[in-house]
Image: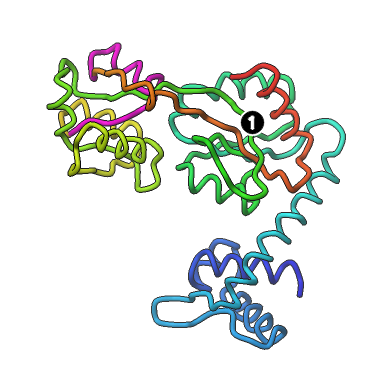
């Protein structure tokens, strides 16, 4: 079993078809199909169920994918730490929730890049759940997410805390009327959404409407236009509030504090680039 075959297998598992995996890997489709068949022959059992809708993992395939993620993450780590073992250099793949990326991280990354110019720092955004999974799979070196995170082999350091506020159309302040409006959030796994549901239940709202808006900008514009209200970090809507586009309202103390943590794989030796970022967060904060 070769690492190249495991990478092809993992790509097919994630993409759901040999065609999409070939495109993602920039391979010829026939090569992808052949390597999957070879892997199944070597193991003596099918790894995928084929259908007109694509390729789905069998139970054996699910089991192999867990090992493939760990093996490939270790191989990638070995390559990074061997190549970049002295001064912090090379790639550093960081993920972040959108609100933190927009309001907190650029000054940190500016300081980091100034001290370690040989590091190729990249930043991608996403929801907390998806970012945690990308760190677990080794697709990201670390990520800023809403805590607390309880995941095996994931370490974390406290980065900063946000104040969560209720955001409404400008000039609206009747709490009962605001809570009767639809709630606008990112997606099902949104941390703000979970808190909002608890808050609404405590406020006596047993039924409510939730609408999913894909980005922070869309949520703020939707609230400003009167489509609904939302729960967001105060720092994320400060500019819009100053411009008179929205108003914000303090939440009960139990719902205000929103910790943001930097997470990383605790079961693997981090690169010097990652360790330097961890040190900067711990010593200087954000």
Instruction: Give percent across and percent down for residue 14.
Output: 53, 64
Q: Is residue 64 above or below residue 127?
A: below
Q: Residue at x 19, y 37 (%)?
A: 205
Quick check: 121 left or right of 184? right
* Quarter assignment of residue 264: top right
**Residue 209, image x, y percentages:** 19, 43
Q: Nearer the viewer, residue 219 or 124?
A: 219
Determine the residue positioned at 72% across, 32% down. 119
Secondary element under disc 1, as helix, strand or loop, is strand
Check the image and report above or below for 277 versus 240. Answer: below
The color scheme shown is rainbow
Q: Check the picture and name the quadrant holding the C terminus.
A: top right
**Extreme residue toward the top, this view:** 242
Q: Residues within 10 Å of mark 1 (few under 14, many from 20)?
A: some
Q: Position of residue 243 (x, y in %)?
A: 27, 13
Residue under the point 16% across and 15% down: 171
Identify the image quadrant of residue 214. top left
Q: Quadrant of the N terminus?
A: bottom right
Query: With 94 as the anchor, is 254 left or right in this view?
Result: left
Residue 55 at x, y percent in the picture: 48, 76
Residue 230, quarter of the rendered image: top left
- The vertical placement of 39 against 20, above or below, is below
Give the number of marks: 1
Q: Answer whether residue 80 is magenta in the image.
A: no
In the rendered image, which residue does mark 1 sit on? 157
Q: Residue at x 17, y 17 (%)?
A: 173
Q: What segment is highlighted magenta in the picture?
A: 228-246
Judging depth in this view, the residue of 286 and 42 nearest the camera is 286
- Position of 79 with respect to 193 (left or right) is right
Rendered position, 1 above or below 144: below
């Amino acid at each position: 079993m070769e690492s190249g075959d495991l990478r092809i297998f993992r790509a097919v598992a994630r993409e759901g078809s040999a065609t999409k995996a070939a495109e993602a890997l920039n391979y010829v489709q026939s090569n992808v199909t052949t390597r999957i068949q070879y892997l199944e022959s070597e193991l003596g059992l099918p790894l995928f169920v084929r259908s007109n809708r694509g390729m789905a993992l069998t139970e054996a395939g699910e089991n192999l994918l867990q090992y493939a993620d760990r093996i490939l993450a270790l191989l990638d780590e070995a390559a990074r730490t061997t190549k970049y073992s002295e001064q912090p250099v090379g790639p550093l793949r960081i993920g972040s929730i959108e609100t933190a990326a927009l309001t907190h991280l650029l000054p940190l990354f500016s300081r980091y890049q100034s001290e370690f110019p040989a590091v190729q720092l990249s930043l991608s955004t996403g929801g907390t759940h998806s970012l945690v999974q990308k760190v677990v799979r080794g697709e990201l070196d670390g990520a800023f997410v809403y805590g607390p995170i309880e995941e095996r082999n994931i370490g974390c350091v406290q980065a900063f805390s946000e104040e969560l506020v209720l955001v409404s159309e400008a000039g609206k302040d009747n709490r009962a009327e605001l809570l009767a409006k639809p709630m606008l959030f990112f997606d099902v796994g949104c941390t703000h959404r979970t808190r909002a549901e608890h808050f609404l239940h405590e406020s006596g709202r047993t039924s409510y409407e939730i609408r999913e808006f894909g980005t922070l900008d869309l949520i703020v514009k939707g609230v400003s236009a009167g489509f609904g209200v939302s729960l967001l970090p105060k720092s994320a809507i400060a500019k819009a509030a100053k411009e008179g586009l929205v108003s914000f309202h303090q939440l009960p103390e139990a719902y205000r504090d929103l910790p943001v943590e930097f997470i990383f794989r605790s079961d693997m030796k981090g690169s010097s680039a990652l360790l330097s970022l961890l040190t900067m967060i711990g010593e200087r904060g954000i």
